């Protein structure tokens, strides 16, 4: 199998629930990507994630996915704040 070149990276952070949702969302994704899940940081249980893509367009798509699953977004949806 030939190694694929992923020149665009999208960093993000998700909690355990967000990570589960991310895997569900990416299951069957047709866009080529590489997902790296990093060790939890601190006592919060939040994990850094990096999505590597081939194109800027795909990077923007995955950036939107990660933003929806970020802990800050989840907290604001849960607690009704901006």
Image: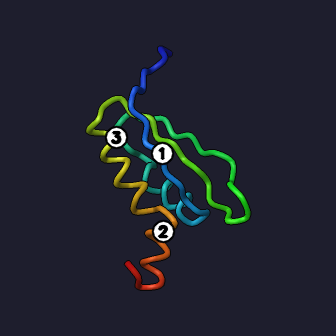
Residue where numbered disc 2 is placed: 72
Kindly report which numbered mark, 3 or 1, lies closer to the viewer in this rendering: 1
Q: CA distance from mark 2 to mark 3?
A: 20 Å
| SS label for mark 3 | helix
Image quarter (top left, top right, bottom left or bottom right) of the C terminus:
bottom left
Q: Which mark is residue 11?
A: 1
Q: In the current view of this chain or complex, which residue is farthest to the bottom?
A: 80
Of pointers 2 and 3, the one earlier in the residue sequence: 3
Q: Find numbered disc 2 in the image and state the secondary structure of the residue it sits on.
A: helix
- Is the residue marked by circle 3 packed among few (<14), some (14-19), or many (20+) residues within 10 Å? many
Inter-mark Cα distance, 3 to 1: 10 Å
Name of the residue lying farthest toward the right: 43
Residue 7 image offset from top left, x and y in percent: 40, 26
Vertical side of 30 occupied by 54: above or below: above
Instruction: Tell whether label 1 touches label 2 (CB within 8 Å).
Output: no
**In this figure, which residue is indicated by the disc labeled 3?**
59
Q: Secondary structure at mark 1?
A: strand
Q: Residue furthest top?
A: 2
């Amino acid at each position: 199998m030939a190694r694929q070149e992923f020149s665009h990276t999208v960093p993000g952070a998700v909690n355990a629930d967000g990570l589960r949702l991310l895997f569900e969302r990416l299951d069957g994704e047709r866009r080529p990507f590489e997902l790296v899940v990093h060790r939890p940081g601190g006592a919060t249980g939040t994990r850094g994630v990096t999505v590597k893509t081939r194109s800027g367009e795909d990077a923007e798509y995955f950036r939107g996915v990660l933003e929806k699953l970020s802990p800050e977004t989840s907290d604001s949806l849960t607690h009704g704040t901006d």
